[in-house]
Image (spheres, grey):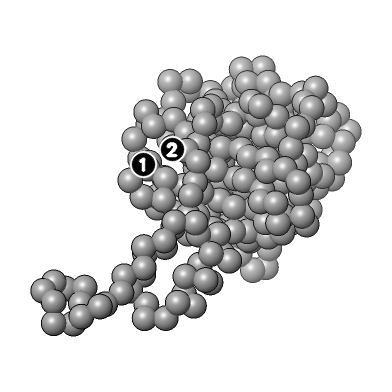
Amino acid sequence: MQITDYRAFHAALQTCLSVVPKRSPVPILYSLRVEFRDQGVSLTACDGETYFRSFLAGQSEPGDAGKALCVNVADLRLAFPKPTKPVQEPALDICGTKFVVTLGGARSVFEGNPAEDFPEFPKMEELKPSAVFHLEPSEIKTAFARVEHAVSPEVTRYALNGVLLERQKSGAIRLVASDGKRLAWSLAGSEGATPFKPRVILRVETMRLLSRLPGAFPLRSDKEFAWVQHPDFELKTRQIAGEFPDVVIGLSTHSPEWQTSVAAYVLGARIFEHHFTIDRTWKGTDN
């Protein structure tokens, strides 16, 4: 299998590696499933909750299609360094349990595991969406960066361990995070007015993955899963169960002008604490 765009291959590999769990009792999850196809190769990663598969272009040799193997992530990092100029395209081969990489005149051979040991990728055609969010990764990345600090680090907080995506009636997508003490929210994009407000709670790891995917795409969801189907990649992840606390936005201000509160109301605030001074000779720091 001859890779035809090493830069794209390397970028897709890094995205897949970001899905691999840092700790897992299932050793095979520290591997990627590499499969040769008629028009290229696919890389699949799984952390037990999220499945991600990337499709890369390549020129296959007779008999390549259908070959598959699980390759350890440490071996993949070693086999595919960051592309340099001039870019040299790698050639891949699977011989039994051997994964062979030829790059820049060097030939590396790695021992893999049977592809059947890797979790089977879910069948996407069986899913029936109840909500659709049209995402632009650059906007999601910016909005997520504004709220990530507020996600609860305690693994037992369930819904508070994730980020709420909620489409507003205006069409904008609101991202909300809270650890029970602080709350952060940010808006991303606009899809046009809608009479209902679908919502989904996604893991922080899933949000990071969505932020690095290329191009715009629809994120579909039902009551249990969220997924993306794109010509270049597929994603399926389990939502965080539970209800995210209702979010009421407020404003606390010392502004001497009333326009600040009006602007905050327009932006969504509904609870107000507006400090004002009656007599500066009174005791206290607010006068």
Q: Are marks 2 and 1 in contact (CB under 8 Å)?
A: yes
Pointer 2 local density, CA inside 10 Å: few below 14, some 14–19, many at least 20: many
In space, the residues marked 2 and 1 are separated at their CA atoms by 7 Å
- Percent from the top left, x then y, of residue 260? 46, 75
Helix, strand or loop for disc 2: helix
Nearer to the camera, 8 or 87? 8
Dividing the picture into quadrants, the one containing residue 286 is bottom left
| Residue 189 visible within the image | yes
Q: Which mark is residue 160?
A: 2
Nearer to the camera, 124 or 38? 124
Q: Amino acid at mark 2?
A: Leu
Q: Is residue 250 left or right of residue 135?
A: left
Which residue lies most toward the top here?
A: 116
Quarter of the image with the N terminus is top right
Q: Total of numbered circles in the picture?
A: 2
- Percent from the top left, x then y, of residue 110? 57, 33
Q: Is residue 219 left or right of residue 199?
A: right
Nearer to the camera, 41 or 141? 141
Residue at coordinates 36% horizontally, 68% vertically from top-left? 274
Q: Earlier in the sequence, mark 2 or mark 1?
A: 2
Q: Which is closer to the viewer, label 2 or label 1?
A: 1
Q: Amino acid at mark 1?
A: Gly
Dividing the picture into quadrants, the one containing residue 6 is bottom right
Please determine whether, in this image, residue 217 is positioned above or below residue 32. Answer: below
- Percent from the top left, x then y, of residue 236? 67, 33
Please determine whether, in this image, residue 97 is positioned above or below residue 221. Answer: above
Q: Which mark is residue 180?
A: 1
| Residue 14 visible within the image | no
Dividing the picture into quadrants, the one containing residue 84 is bottom right
